[in-house]
Amino acid sequence: MKYGSHYSVMKKDILDVLSRDFSDQESLTFADLTFGAGGHTRAIAELFKDSSVYSFDQDPDAISNGEKFLEKEGLLDQVKLIDSNFNNFSNMLAAELRFDGVLLDAGVSSHQFDTGERGFSFRFDGPLDMRMNPNAGVPAADLLNGMSEEELRGIFQSYGEEKFSRQIAKSIVERREVEPFTTTKQLEDTCFHAYPKKLRHGKIHPATKVFQALRIMVNDELGVLGDVIRQVIPRLKVNGLLMIITFHSLEDRIVKHAFKEWKNESFPIEILTKKPLLPSAEEIFENSRSRSAKLRVIRRVKDWPSKNKYPKKE
């Protein structure tokens, strides 16, 4: 399958941050934890010609097309493409490897949203799947058909911050007793009619937050985000940077709190973004999906004290 085009969110901001810190250095080592269509990886590799970039992706479409993309761009010697979820960051890399910069774009790729058979969007009538790696995990339809009404309500409320979570969960349980959920349009229709009539045609579609919540649940997005931060920080070189782009408040809250957790005498990092960087008006005009993006950056500032333990995992 041809991998769809993708706008690399806040690419200029990322390059500005890296240029400011590493403009006079050579033989740098970077990681891009979500390769996608390769936009961020290519930009970093082209900016730092002598650098090495380790890029992760668990989507078979991204890996297949990424290999062709890297060959076309002449980047096969510079970029190592790793077929894995970024949660395997430590396991997939040599123990001695350390990084000058690590980027994580936590968003879903445009290719995944725009490919109906992946089930990420209710703009298409496709299988209700939502798995970023379609060869692993449990499809969204299985969760929707198997979880209790109270469990569904909790997911929609916690991961989607959906104020009509109870009504939607009740409608889902009632509908699946007649026919199991298999398609995105079934879920979209159920969410739409569960909403009060006067709110069904608002700025945000009634199914938006439910689809977000299910996607987060299917891919354990919040769990792996917190875990990878704990893996990456010990692998940063002194003065190395960790840059994370998030797209909704739940992700941003995890990143903000995780960064603060590491900011103490035992775990010496410097938070470079007291408030997150936001996309420019120009970028939002070019790509409306950028509008909710937030970029937070930290720098490791000195050697790791060997006597210290990692912060406790929640």
Image (cartoon, grey):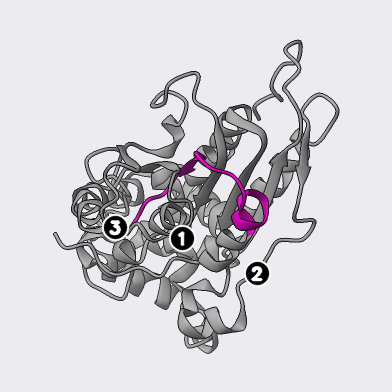
Residue 124 placement: quadrant: bottom left
Q: Where is mark 2, residue-wise? A: 278
Specify whether residue 87 is painted magenta.
no
Check disc 3 and report its element: helix, strand or loop. Answer: helix
Q: Is residue 152 left or right of residue 100?
A: left
Q: Nearer the viewer, mark 1 or mark 3?
A: 1
Q: Where is mark 3, residue-wise? A: 176
The magenta region covers 17-36
How far is the residue under mark 1 from the one under mark 3?
Answer: 20 Å
Considering depth in this image, is 55 or 127 the residue closer to the camera?
55
Considering depth in this image, is 208 or 67 the residue closer to the camera?
67
The C terminus lies in quadrant = top right
* Observer able to see residue 304: yes
How many neighbours does mark 1 have within 10 angstroms: few (below 14), some (14-19), or many (20 or more)? Answer: many
Mark 1 and mark 2 residues within 8 Å of each other at the beta carbon: no
Mark 3 and mark 2 residues within 8 Å of each other at the beta carbon: no
Above or below 216: residue 205: below
Q: Nearer the viewer, mark 3 or mark 2?
A: 2
First reached walking from the N terminus: tag 1 or tag 2 = 1
User: Looking at this rendering, what residue extends furthest in the right direction?
Assistant: 265
Mark 1 and mark 3 residues within 8 Å of each other at the beta carbon: no
How far is the residue under mark 3 from the one under mark 2?
Answer: 41 Å
How many neighbours does mark 3 have within 10 angstroms: few (below 14), some (14-19), or many (20 or more)? Answer: some
How many neighbours does mark 2 have within 10 angstroms: few (below 14), some (14-19), or many (20 or more)? Answer: some
Residue 58 locus on image (x, y percent): 31, 43
Amino acid tagged 1: Gln
Considering depth in this image, is 228 or 163 the residue closer to the camera?
228
Give the residue drawn at x 54%, y 59%: 160
Q: Where is mark 1, residue-wise? A: 212
Give the residue drawn at x 73%, y 44%: 257
Check disc 1 and report its element: helix, strand or loop. Answer: helix
Amino acid tagged 3: Arg
